[in-house]
Amino acid sequence: MAQLFHRGANNIAKASMALVIVLGGVVYFAYSQIARSSYLTNRYLERPQPVQFSHKHHVGDDGIDCRYCHTSVETAASAGIPPTQTCMNCHNQLWAETPYLEPVRASYRDNKPILWERVHDLPGFVYFNHSIHVAKGVGCSTCHGAVDTMPAVYQENTLQMEWCTSCHKNPEAFIRPKSEIYNMSWKDSNLTAEERANLKKEYKIRSREMLTSCSICHR
């Protein structure tokens, strides 16, 4: 019987398989980069707010502690959004007549909350508790970055699952003394490996297997 395919067809088939493998690798690499990009994660995106509140001014310049506004960060799952009364504690005296702060005064007069645009917004299928992270020695800047240098707060990290699990696999690399939780200038290199191991033991941080269990974040 006559040969159906030319002898060169074998070479074409081999080249086609190699091309498919290479293209598959390229597509996977492109997808992994796009998935981590700020285009999809909203990383470094400064969101317009009803009032352009500057953390750089209030935290960096004036030295206001995080807990003055975010009152429930140590006791609840949510850090809390400050009510307008918190703003007015200062601004009924400071810059009390400036047009820039009229939305704040209107909120206080009308007893209507300011509708802030959320910056760090996890999906609904993810459970996150601020208080347990603070209790275990995770500082504000570890997740939120150097907020004291941000005129407008943006999302410093991707908030993707791989970012969370990188800490849950090795929590001692990210914890700090509780006295430094709200220290924006703290560096992870400020502690030795032995000091980190001691803190992990002191804080009774769970095992890697438990911290990476699906039910920790997906409940």
Image (cartoon, rainbow, N blue to C red):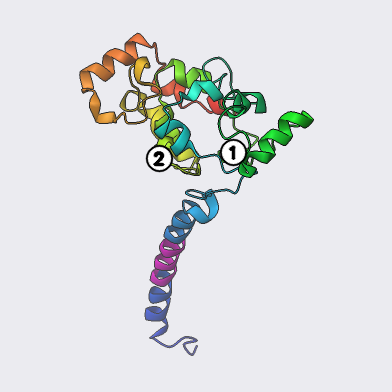
Residue 83 on the magenta segment: no
| Residue 209 x %, y % | 42, 23
The answer to whether 41 is drawn above or below residue 114 in the figure is: below
Q: Residue at x 42, y 76 (%)?
A: 13
- Is residue 129 visible in this depiction of the protein? no
**In the displayed structure image, the side of residue 173 where residue 161 appears, left or right:** right
User: Regarding mark 1 in the picture, which secondary structure is present there?
Assistant: loop
Instruction: Give, as a single range, the part of the protein colored magenta.
Output: 18-27
User: Residue 146 sits in which quadrant?
Assistant: top left
How crowded pointer 2 is (Cα within 10 Å; few <14, some 14-19, many 20+) is rated as some
| Residue 25 x %, y % | 41, 61
- Is residue 135 visible in this depiction of the protein? yes
Quadrant placement of the C terminus: top right
User: Regarding mark 2 in the picture, which secondary structure is present there?
Assistant: helix
The residue mark sitting in front, 2 or 1, is: 2
Q: Which mark is residue 121?
A: 1
Residue 20 on the magenta segment: yes
Q: Which mark is residue 149?
A: 2
- Measured in 3D between alpha carbons, the distance from the residue under mark 2 to the one under mark 1, in whole angstroms, is 21 Å
| Residue 100 x %, y % | 61, 44
Q: Main secondary structure of the magenta part?
A: helix
The answer to whether 153 is drawn above or below residue 186 in the figure is: below
How crowded pointer 1 is (Cα within 10 Å; few <14, some 14-19, many 20+) is rated as few
Using the image as rendered, state which of residue 106 and residue 162 is in the foreground.
106
Which amino acid does the dot numbered 2 rest on?
Thr
User: Residue 71 sits in which quadrant?
Assistant: top right
| Residue 58 x %, y % | 47, 33
Q: Residue at x 40, y 15 (%)?
A: 205
